[in-house]
Image (cartoon, coloured by chain):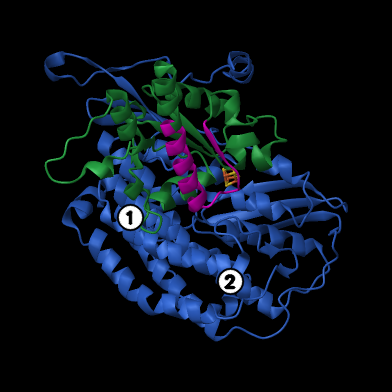
Chain colours: A blue, B green
Amino acid sequence: MTDRCEETLGVGLLCEGQHDPGVPPAGLRRSPSGVDGLTTEHLIINMGPQHPSTHGVLRLIIEVDGEEIVAVEVSVGYLHRGIEKLAEHRRYDAVGTLMDRGDYVSGMMGELAFALAAEQLMDVEVPRKAHWLRSLASELNRLASHLVWYGTFGLDTGAMGQFLYAMREREALLDILEALSGQRMMFNYIRPGGVVADMPLGLTEQIRTFLSTFDTYLDEYHQLLGGNEIFQMRVKGIGTIDRQMALAFGLTGANLRAAGVDFDVRRARPYAAYPELDFEVPLGTTGDAWDRYIVRMGEMRQSARMIAQLIDGMPEGAFTAKVPRIIRPNAGEAYASVESSRGETGIHLFADGTEHPYRMHYRGPSLFAAQALEEILPGHLIADAVMIVGSTDIMLGELDR
Amino acid sequence: MAIDKFTGENSIAFIRSEQLFDFARRNSLWYIAFGIACCAIEGLMSASGPRFDFDRMGVFFRNSPRQADVMIVAGTVNHKMALTVKRLYDQMPEPKWVVAMGACACTGGPFREYPNVVLGVDTIIPVDVYIPGCPPRPESVQYAFIELQKKIARRTEERLAARNR
Ligand code: SF4
């Protein structure tokens, strides 16, 4: 046991410049602004990688002056598992399994991004029904993902009830997704050329039953959390990312739209069935944590609207194009992006004519949001850090890849 | 030792102290809220949600390792993370148990070819129950806890048998 442990933990673990979690980084500063000319020493607080509110294994090294944050260092890489590299050793129809595990709360969107990129290099006409099924799967998954965010964001403020309600709805959604794809989280449903399976019998009814109550529930949930005065006081006005900063950091998704920038990949670069759907893009004004909350709640409502349109107008026909069993796209380069639950998820693909991708780059929106944390956290109180990290809705699987 | 036999009025139960402690331990397996990757959504989040509701088995999450009895390793452990996992395990008070959840924690799973990934968390800490699957369903995690309870009961009996010998 001990030998194996040392073997794993021992050699070359701490690279140069990497902090051992037990040792604070060098360079403690002194605050010049002490009372009566007295100086106070800054304190370094380590938050994570095991912290219930970092939504995974994010590590923040926070330098505080009393209760106030003066500097933040975001340390990532605790979940790096080489998705980009492993994709070079997977066949095209199997890369989806890795994409699922990237952004694991909204796997469908990752798969869709890869499928769209691969299809640009293949001579294939995706049938209309496949487009609609892809959109349906994406929107159902977006709802499930936003519900996880809603539940845990409340947990960060110290509320518990809304988490249980969100999980209840999410289980209903996962039942639907499981009926559609066969798995609760790791679907591998959307593949180059189409989707894997048609809608099973009775699924339309199941979705209708779900939708019939969802809107009312959503109002209730908004009332439960957003109508709570304590919650409002804690969220309003903190973590402001204004328009300019959001654009400079390359933020996408709700974090960008909360700042008032009208950019949604579903509308800017339409894919799947979105050109045919009627939906609105909720926008915020100031870009604080409250705006991000409002935008995401609005997105849930729009998703429910889209799902209703999608099951009503679901076309007939084939659910996948004829694709060879071993896909060999033409050599070349392609970029495709989708609007995932967190922002623009893009796949930049290089193919060399063999059955494996030559190189795949995975653009995840969370890394950009995590970088912005270093800028927005200083100046806030230490208790607000948890809220701000929660409001950006980062997903560590896709951040570290 | 069946406690429910003694629930009548004015009843007295005779029980060895260690039996009592193990009975309590078995029925309040608090796990540390430490999700690493995808499995955490199923094993920690859905598990504490209303459908699966581990609470009714006495399984509940604690945020600090110092208050926890069980560690569910839910996710891929890479070399950067391994140090933290080991440190958290060392911080948990005895007696402690480890559940390796998912293919990643058992063997490295879908990422096993990547050199950065630890090939099974049992290379750094001792594991009591393995759960296969990617991700395992919450039901499997529930089953793992039932197995863990059995294991603890077995340990009590073994210890008592050794004493009486
Ligand atoms: S076993 Fe599968 S679901 Fe679990 S952490 Fe590993 S990749 Fe994710």
Q: Which quadrant of the figure has residue A298?
A: bottom left
Q: Residue A251, can we see it?
A: no
Could you classify mark 2 by the number of other residues whose Cα lies within 10 Å: few (under 14), some (14-19), or many (20 or more)?
Answer: many
User: For this view, does A290 lie left or right of residue A94?
Assistant: left
What are the residue bounds of the magenta stretch? Answer: B128-153
Q: Chain of mark 1?
A: A
- Badge 2 is on which residue? A135
Q: Is residue B140 magenta?
A: yes
**How far is mark 2 from mark 1, CA to CA?**
27 Å
Q: On the image, numbered disc 1 is attached to which residue?
A: A163
- Quadrant location of the N terminus of chain A in the rendered image: top right
Judged by depth in the image, the label closer to the viewer, 2 or 1, is: 1
Image quarter where ligand 1 lies: top right
Q: What residue is at 26 percent from the left and 37 percent from the top?
A: A383
Residue nearest the viewer, comparing A36 with A43: A43
Q: Nearer the viewer, residue A298 or B24?
A: B24
Does dot 2 land on a helix, a strand or a loop?
Answer: helix
Q: Secondary structure at mark 1?
A: helix
Amino acid type of the residue tagged 1 in the rendering: Phe
The stretch drawn in magenta includes residue A297? no
Look at label 2 and name its amino acid: Ser
